Amino acid sequence: MLQPATSQLESSATFVTSHANLQWKLIMNLQRLLNIDIPLIQAPMAGVQLHGLAAAVCNAGGLGSLPCAMLDAAGLRKELTALSEKTSKPYNLNFFCHTPPAPQPQQESIWREALGPYYAELDIDPASIASGPGRQPFSAEMADLLDEFRPAVVSFHFGLPSPELLGRVKACGAKVLGSATTVAEALWLEAHGADVIGAQGLEAGGHRGMFLTDEITSQLGTFALLPQIVAAVSLPVVAAGGIADAQGVRAAMSLGAAGVQIGTAYLCCPEASTSAIHRAALHSPAAQHTALTNLFSGRPARGIVNRVMRELGPISAATPSFPLATAAIAPLRAKAESQGSGDFSPLWAGQNASGCKSMAAALLTAELACGFIQ
Ligand SMILES: Cc1cc2nc3c(=O)[nH]c(=O)nc-3n(C[C@H](O)[C@H](O)[C@H](O)COP(=O)(O)O)c2cc1C
């Protein structure tokens, strides 16, 4: 049998030790930077959680996140007040920063026409449906609240806000996490003022954070994306997408991550507001079939394949731009859900729903944190 020379063995051992040290330093850096005990971020998940889940994860030593994309300023104030009452630990506020499109009346009518048979089936009068944006980007009004509540971390999906607004975020003392889905996006975020890069692999549930490209072929799985981003930037990189247990955490850390961001695994915790229909889908064999779809908002997002995704898409040319597609499909969702059906619901989920357990978020956080023990 081929035996490596003693000197080779020694140099491998030195390499392994120094690699372990390097990884430990990365973890420590992120813990210090974000002022957290465990370098685990509970992914912000608009529509399925508010302050309850965020507070539980913060109190367990991770970084809990409050998704703000579907809140107006009054709603955000209410949530921040409740969150501050439930935890004194650092937390993350998450905003979208897309450019809202101009109204698209022609595309809107194409979209409503595509949904027409479903309106008829569910007895919904299309004339009664208001059009509206659904999700708002980060604004000066939201920045005023940051001055008041001083979150430790602010994360952004779909790029970063204007330099002026970003300056306000930094001035309130928050560290900024930007979500990258390609190496080019990670480099852009580093050059434009992010403190931490989130590497969002293709397995991830919810919206793709992509902002420099709309080509789905550019989107890589976590295993391919993470090491390439780690090699390209000098900022700490947090891995997201498909991480569902301590083994997954360990795998991400061994690929150079400084921490992890986990969403899907938290969806069935009692502190999340995930609907009963969504929870049932996550616990059923249907959860093994996810796809990127633009039907619910106009932008690609990963969810469990349901009837409307099978029949119209999952990617359709009929939808108006993000986030305008939401208004026309929302009444179908509401009506179907009132009848116990998820046929028209965005059942957001990542490719790995195996970690979805109906257990307290603090316990789940502790289980996942075992992945940091070497
Ligand atoms: C239900 C759901 C809603 C999400 N909403 C948001 C959001 O509001 N903002 C955001 O930045 N990311 C959102 N994401 C994406 C997460 O930040 C993260 O990238 C993803 O959950 C990680 O992959 P995993 O779901 O496989 O753990 C959402 C994900 C899910 C599953």
Image: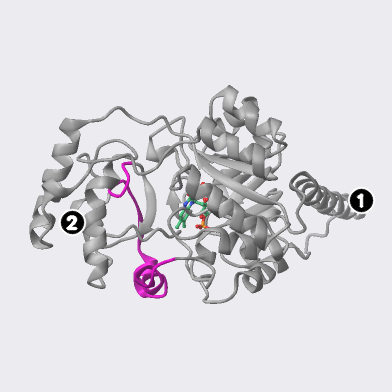
Q: Can residue 337 be seen in this view?
A: yes
Q: Position of residue 362 (x, y in %)?
A: 65, 70
* Nearer the observer, 152 or 369: 152
Could you tell me which residue is drawn at 22 percent across and 55 percent down? 331
Q: Position of residue 249 (x, y in %)?
A: 65, 61
Disc sitting over residue 333 in the figure = none
Which label's residue is closer to the chain start, 1 or 2? Answer: 1
Q: What residue is shown with label 1?
A: 7
Q: In terms of secondary structure, where does tag 1 sit?
A: helix
Q: Is residue 289 magenta?
A: yes
Q: Position of residue 118 (x, y in %)?
A: 13, 57
Apparent side of residue 306 relative to residue 273 in the rendered image (left or right): left
* Nearer the observer, 240 or 145: 145
Q: What residue is shown with label 2?
A: 311
Whether tag 1 and tag 2 are in contact, CB under 8 A, the answer is no
Apparent side of residue 165 relative to residue 275 in the rendered image (left or right): right
Residue at mark 1 to residue at mark 2: CA–CA distance: 63 Å
Which range of residues does the magenta coloring cover?
274-298
Q: Which of marks 1 and 2 is in front?
A: 2
Three-letter residue code for mark 1: Ser
Task: Place residue 341 in its image quadrant.
Answer: bottom left
Apparent side of residue 155 relative to residue 219 in the rendered image (left or right): right
Could you tell me which residue is drawn at 21 percent across and 57 percent down? 332
